[in-house]
Amino acid sequence: MSRVYTLTESNVESIAQRVAGILADCGICIIPTDTIYGIVALEQCSKAVYRIYEIKKRPVQKQFIRLISGPDRLRDY
């Protein structure tokens, strides 16, 4: 089921918790950035990752950009 949340200064924490819960349940979220919207999922949730490939009609041989929390995570890849 799709839902749209409007982010305001007063609900940032509750929206962040909702998004974290959706991602933890292997869901997909669309997040606005300063220039584009990003389609996000947790890398360890293969069902969600493959769903993004389907949505984007992208060949699975073509990898996605991975965003990490900091330089210390580079060694994981």
Image: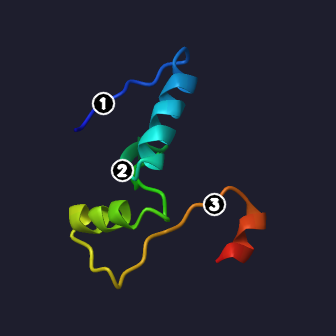
Seen from this angle, which residue lies furthest bottom? 61
Q: Residues within 10 Å of mark 1 (few under 14, many from 20)?
A: few
Seen from this angle, which residue lies furthest top? 10
Mark 3 → mark 2, Cα distance in angstroms: 17 Å
Mark 2 → mark 1, Cα distance in angstroms: 12 Å
Provide residue 3's location: percent of width, then percent of height: 28, 32
Give yes or no for contact between labels 1 and 3 (Cβ–Cβ under 8 Å): no
Look at 36% across and 45% down and name the residue there. 30
Inspect the image, locate mark 2, and give the three-letter code of the amino acid beneath it. Answer: Ile
Provide residue 10's location: percent of width, then percent of height: 54, 14
The residue identified by callout 2 is 28
Q: Mark 3 or mark 2: which is in front?
A: 2
In the displayed structure, does residue 48 sit left or right of residue 67?
Answer: left
Look at 48% across and 58% down and name the residue there. 42
Above/below status of 2 relative to 76: above
The residue identified by callout 3 is 68
Mark 1 → mark 3, Cα distance in angstroms: 25 Å
In the displayed structure, does residue 75 sit left or right of residue 22?
Answer: right
N-terminal label among 1 and 3: 1
Q: Quadrant of the C terminus?
A: bottom right
Quarter where residue 76 is shown = bottom right
Inspect the image, locate mark 3, and give the three-letter code of the amino acid beneath it. Answer: Ile
The residue identified by callout 1 is 4
SS class of the residue under badge 1?
loop
Frontmost residue, 35 versus 28: 28
